[in-house]
Image (spheres, grey):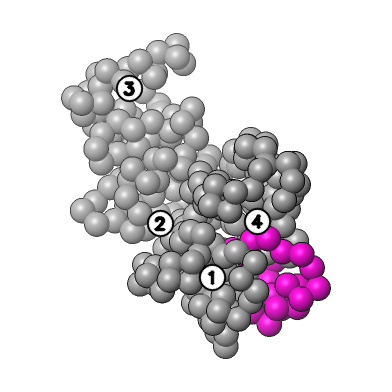
Amino acid sequence: MSKSTLISCLIVDDETVARDIIETHLSKISNVQVVASCSNALEAFHHISHQAIDLVFLDINMPEISGISFAKSINSAVKVIFTTAYRDYAVEGFELKAVDYLLKPISLDRLKQALNSYIDIYGIKNEPLEVVVGQTDFMFVRSDRKMVKLDYHSILYIESYSDYVKIHMKDFNVVTRETISAIEGRLPKRDFMRIHRSYIVAVAHIESFTNEQISIPQKALPISRSYKKEVMKFLETYQ
């Protein structure tokens, strides 16, 4: 692959939302082209047989033909990045010399890291991968065995518990097994602020604040001592 040549990608996943997330991320990265998005392995076989594919984003747990079986059956020149909601397949995935193994929900930064690994491993001389479009106004989180779309403007605050995170929305709450730090890393930094080990608040919904707490509609959230200086400095930019 010569410089500036596009990386031709195929997305294979039986979940529509999961395919949409990857395709949305890839649309923001330079030098990448999504050739097709497939819901099953048979459809993917057709595209690989008739088009030049460099890289496949491949779900492991699919009906009829699993991602592992599919990866074993395709030409070794086509490289694979596995995508799955289950950690248990990691060893088998890497035994197949997969470029990377992405655990859902997949962030833009993590996907870009996997693409850079592909470039580094196979010695492809290409321009640096860059995010070429601004950040979206939503994210997806896994909750109750499905991916749930959350609009940033509807998030009030995020609360961490011992082994899960509760995202408080305007009209409902969503519980996910992600850590609060992982969620924080996916949020627009200008619009959300960590104020406590257990709390992130949406800046747009702040009604008032003191040195000790921040008030949003029908709720007062504490500012911890360790975050106070950073929080006050952040809020000064809005004064």
Q: Name which residue type carries label 2.
A: Val
Q: Name which residue type carries label 1.
A: Asp
Left or right, 88 with respect to 19, comes to: left
Residue drawn at x 51%, y 59% is 99
Q: Quadrant of residue 40?
A: bottom right
Q: Label 1 vs label 3: CA separation?
A: 40 Å
Residue density around tag 1, few if under 14, some if 14–19, many if 20 or more, within 10 Å: many
Q: Label 2 vs label 4: CA separation?
A: 24 Å
| Circle number at residue 59 | 1
Q: Is residue 47 magenta?
A: yes
Mark whose residue sits in front, 1 or 2:
1
| Circle number at residue 174 | 2
Q: Label 2 vs label 3: CA separation?
A: 25 Å
| 175 over 168 or under it: above or below | below
Q: Name which residue type carries label 4.
A: Glu
| 163 over 123 or under it: above or below | below
| Circle number at residue 231 | 3
* Nearer to me, 104 or 183: 104
Q: Label 1 vs label 4: CA separation?
A: 14 Å
Along the polypeptide, which appears first: circle 1 or circle 3? Answer: 1
Q: Regarding mark 1 in the picture, which secondary structure is present there?
A: strand
Mark whose residue sits in front, 4 or 3:
4
Along the polypeptide, which appears first: circle 1 or circle 4? Answer: 4
Residue drawn at x 35%, y 15% is 233
Residue density around tag 3, few if under 14, some if 14–19, many if 20 or more, within 10 Å: some
Q: Name which residue type carries label 3.
A: Val
Residue annotated with mark 4: 23
Along the polypeptide, which appears first: circle 2 or circle 4? Answer: 4
